[in-house]
Amino acid sequence: MKAFKITTLALAAALMAAPGIAQEMQLPQVDQQDASPFDFAESKKKAERAEKMAADGSGSRVVGGELAAEGAWPWQVGLMIAGYPVSPDAHFCGGSLILDQWVLTAAHCIHHQDKNGKYFDLHPSQISILVGTNTISPNSGDNVPVAGIFRNPNYNPDGWDSDVALIKLARKPNANYRTIKVPDANFGDVLDQAGVPTVVTGWGLVNGGTHPDKMYQAEIQMMSRDMCNEALMKARARPASQAFVQAASIFKLSKNDMQKAWEELVKRAPLPLTENMVCSGSFEGGKTSCQGDSGGPLVVPLQDGSYIQAGIVSWGLSAGPNKTCAEDAIFSAYTKVSQFLPWLEQTISQN
């Protein structure tokens, strides 16, 4: 059961020092006619939430990346709508195999909101997991049924904190695949350092907005969480300050009282990126993970040629309220996997 864990002592010296090129990631799309239990996994739904954080999740896949070689990233899996033909239209999220029958993904992929605003978890019978292929097609890989879905109990859909879930497969896949290891808490802090090169993978939009059935890959790099939070808070402050000034005018607050109230409001505002998240992207914009499969892996290359999973694609954002994620996204947020190792071990051992 502990085979999926890597410790600091084992691999801290193996990190590669070369900087990565950034790319962008976010949420998946499902055909509206097929979307009933999958609404929250659609980019439109996520974009509505993301606007509150100056984020635009209009895209849903790896944009600007390169085609992955056949057999590359053998731990990458696709979450599919059960009962539909295997195709890009049935694919709604990504994930990674951390054990033969266990998939790591994002909680928002399996925790959705109905038309009445009530949240619910998907039933195992509603999804299947495509394993062992870089191509989404009926004759590729193994589309494995699901035995159980386990969402982290601390997941907060309003801010996507603790955005992590496990899926147990009904059987071992009949396909060529490998599992990916995850770090312990200490090694996770090593992976979290700004400048650490990373890779995101997934199926989806390429230049021109097409939905290919082939897997793409893109290099990005870790960025400082403090820097990302500072940029996010500034982006939030612009529209918030306009509304605040209007409210202060209505209540006829003095300039002094208005300044005090604003400072108190800013002081109490929660930071968008919590300790349970890592930040990656590009200072150039348009090269973060805004377009990758939600729930998919963010991996770090090691000197011995292996990889370790540092993050789970959670949410993305753009530099301006009128820009799409693909146009100028500067960074994205990933669930920090090492924060949840105790929960992963407990869930797997008990199920």
Image (tube, rainbow, N blue to C red):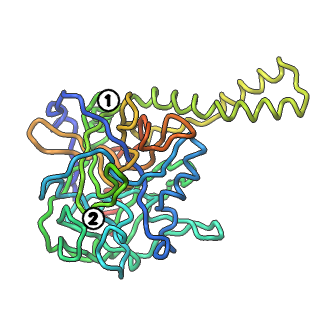
Left or right of residue 76: residue 336:
right
Q: What kind of element bears circle 2?
A: strand
Residue 107 placement: quadrant: bottom left
User: Which quadrant is home to the N terminus?
Assistant: bottom left
Any part of residue 187 in sight: yes
- The answer for how far apart the CA atoms under marks 1 and 2 are is 28 Å
For mark 2, what is the residue? Answer: 102
Which amino acid is tagged 2? Trp
Percent of width and height locating residue 220 = 29, 37
- Numbered marks: total: 2
- Above or below: residue 168 compared with residue 26: below
Percent of width and height locating residue 42 = 48, 61
- Above or below: residue 164 compared with residue 256: below
Residue that extends furthest to the left in the rendered view of this protein:
304
Front-most of 189 and 63? Answer: 63
For mark 1, what is the residue? Answer: 193
Residue depth check, mark 1 versus mark 2: number of the one nearer the observer: 1
The residue carrying pointer 2 sits among few (fewer than 14), some (14 to 19) or many (20 or more) residues within 10 Å by Cα, namely: many
Any part of residue 341 in sight: no
Instruction: Identify which residue is drawn at 35% across, 58% down.
Output: 105
Mark toward the start of the polypeptide (1 vs 2):
2
Which amino acid is tagged 1? Gln
The residue carrying pointer 1 sits among few (fewer than 14), some (14 to 19) or many (20 or more) residues within 10 Å by Cα, namely: some
Front-most of 79 and 210? Answer: 210
- Which disc is residue 144 wearing? none
Q: What kind of element bears circle 1?
A: loop
Left or right of residue 235: residue 249:
right
Residue 18 placement: quadrant: top left
